[in-house]
Image: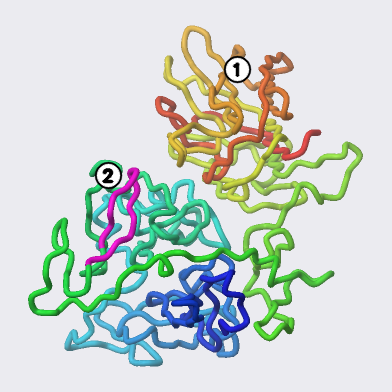
Amino acid sequence: MCNSISISNLPVMMRARNKCNIYIECIVVNGVRQAIAKECAAGQFWDVASQSCKLADNVVCLYDPCRVAPAGSAFPIGLSCTSYYQCKNGRSLVSCCDQAEQFTGMTCQPDPTDICSDTCLITTNPQIGALGMTDDELCEGCVIYDGYGYNPFPGDCNMFVQCAPMGTGFQAFAMKCQVGFFWSQSTHSCAPADQIQCNNDRCKTLGDGSQHYMTGSCRRFYQCAQEKSIPSCCNPGFEFITDTCVQDADNSCTDECVTKVDTAPQWRDPCTYQRGIVGDNTIFEQLQDNGNWIQLTCPGASRFNPASCYCTSTPINNPTVIAPTVTGCQPTADFPFNNDLLDQSPSRMQALNTAKHEQAGPNGYISFDSNDRLVMWQFADFPFKQAVEIRIRYRLPLSADNGKRYTIIANCLSLCEDGLGPGVYLGIQTGDTDEIIGMVDTADDNNLQELRLPYNGGWVDLLLRYDGIKVRLEVDGNSVEASRTGDISKRQTALLLGRFAIPGDSNLIGDVDDLQVFTCLP
């Protein structure tokens, strides 16, 4: 497979033929091409799009046995006696037997003698149980990608939380990256540790030159440089103990070393090897190693997105290609909250809404207490660029605490991934004079400026707009503006109501109606 690749383009990694969990590293040693077969961690398939191993649930693989096996069929995961693949919608989903059961190769059977001691690959214990956090708390603001949500795992860069939508909330699963990799929230995948800025990286406090243990290896460790963990390895015949390499007296450590090739996946643009088919977004074509294109079907209810060139369960919406209207711009989200809680925009986006629906009918609205939220997943990691307009009707309740500040809508939770605030924000400050607050953060200017206008009680119409030149805040037609340039800062968090976005704010309380979000300029 590697012979067809120019030496100047090596190293690269390629999908292995006939195996979903195997990939090939093509490298050069002394001027000679070499192909090294490597295996993903248990329960993971090689993902061509991200050039990394990912949970099998989230990878479309031509050689997945579940593509042809009947729904409900089961296949083993390596030698595990508790974890297995179950077929659903033509895809292998990682599943586990119940306690006191073992997987026998086809089904889960009673394990009366407790022979099976394997840990479920998707268990929430003990890691999640030890955190003392609910599943919804762990999944708060998670980035939705192909039907699942993802968040960093608190306190551990090598792990991440996978969030499966369950009713109005989530079920959280603790997942591990392969050895030497950290979770990347921006790419929704694991990547080499030295390429990731992780707030929990131990090297941020240990200091340059320090060393720390790499989970899952006796020989490999991390070396601290510029407050980042760099994968390193003890010499042959040595093992890493506590904070240094010591001689392996009994030769029990047989781990291989982490090399630059091990931790240097080369990303390939999916649009270079996958393409859509005009008139049918349930199927697509994929380029094979022999140069031929084959036709594949998107799994389940997912659809092929011509912008990203892969199948996604997220509603496909590109504001730049929406059919023009009389005004030339349609809302990307439009929630009138009259007869139902559904989005009435052309995108018909899916949103999580736990707020109470009041007075269903022409005068309907939703009411928030401090535990409610409305989450618009489509705006997670969304490139607003230089165009956004948010319209919303809001009413502060008489029960609001004087002197408190409440976030109304924003795309951040407390502080965002880079330690800064939200890209877009509307809030209200109570006090002797209540004020509506609007902000937009752009990449050209980190000096976030608050725009303020008086709030005089009752229902008010709010508008926050940015056009690449200035930010404008309106309250019942009264407006204030400030100059600003550059693209709106991308935030990994979804656009949401109900959760505080900056330190000192409180969760939203009050009534909301006629919510619209434009990603063009009406």
**Identity of the residue drawn at 27% across and 65% down:** 233
In the picture, measured across the screen, residue 297 lies left or right of residue 96, that is right
Picture quadrant where residue 256 is located: bottom left
Task: Give the mark nearest the N terminus, 2 or 1.
Answer: 2
Which image quarter is the C terminus in? top right
**Identity of the residue drawn at 45% across and 59% down:** 163
Up-down relation of residue 214 to residue 334 (above or below): below
Q: Amino acid at mark 2?
A: Asp
Mark 2 vs mark 1, CA separation in Å: 42 Å
Up-down relation of residue 79 to residue 298 (above or below): below
Q: Which residues are magenta?
A: 221-234
Q: Which mark is residue 208?
A: 2
Pick out the residue farthest to the left: 249
Residue 229 in percent (x, y) is at 33, 52
Which image quarter is the N terminus in? bottom right
What SS does tag 2 mark? loop
Q: Residues within 10 Å of mark 2 (few under 14, many from 20)?
A: some
Q: Which mark is residue 451?
A: 1
Q: Is residue 19 magenta?
A: no
Up-down relation of residue 199 to residue 36 (above or below): above
